[in-house]
Image: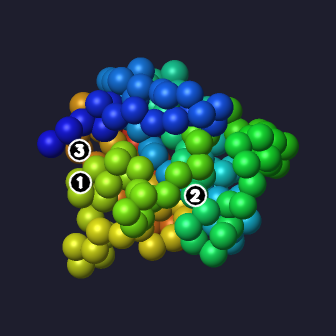
Amino acid sequence: MTAITDFQVKGADGKPVDLSSYAGKVLLIVNTASKCGFTPQYKGLEALHRKYAAQGFEVLGFPCNQFGSQEPGDAAEIAEFCTVNYDVTFPVFAKIDVNGSGADPLFDRLKDAAPGLMGSRGIKWNFTKFLVDRSGAKVTRYGPQTTPEEIEKDIEALLAG
């Protein structure tokens, strides 16, 4: 199976970003939205990013407008929202689809690696999180209701391992 770090995504500026630049790091990949009930999770995501970045941890945010049209803005509006409201310093990439025929290949790979409840493939809502080990191969899925703080022990275990 292809490692997560073998994928290329679009940065907020629309330019390609090779995820190989994150090789050897523990990653928390999240589909985000600015107008969602789970949006305050940005605060916890940023706290984790700041706490563990020096140990080889990165949060990667992927805005998505597929759930209730809760991410209507363009890249500049999304970046401003994240900076002004949550002082986000982790990378926030170009807006993508995570489900359907137009789903980004990265998210197809994540869904294959870590199916949801009862083997479901689709992402159900904003702020679904995927924790990826340093090899880029082992992936764990967390639903939107799982807070960043609840994932911290799993992050610590991967950083220590």
Q: What amino acid is at disc 3?
A: Lys
Q: Position of residue 148 (x, y in %)?
A: 54, 54
* Figure coloring: rainbow
Q: Nearer the viewer, residue 81 or 74?
A: 74
Mark 2–mark 3 Cα distance, whole angstroms, equals: 23 Å
Callout 3: few (<14), some (14-19), or many (20+) C-alpha neighbours within 10 Å?
some
Sequence-first disc among 1 and 2:
2
Name the residue beneath numbered marker 3.
138
Callout 2: few (<14), some (14-19), or many (20+) C-alpha neighbours within 10 Å?
many
Q: Which mark is residue 113?
A: 1
Q: Which mark is residue 30?
A: none
Callout 1: few (<14), some (14-19), or many (20+) C-alpha neighbours within 10 Å?
many
Q: Residue at x 45, y 44 (%)?
A: 28
Q: Residue at x 26, y 65 (%)?
A: 115
Q: Secondary structure at mark 2?
A: loop
Name the residue beneath numbered marker 2.
64
Above-or-below relation of 112 to 69: above
Q: Secondary structure at mark 3?
A: loop
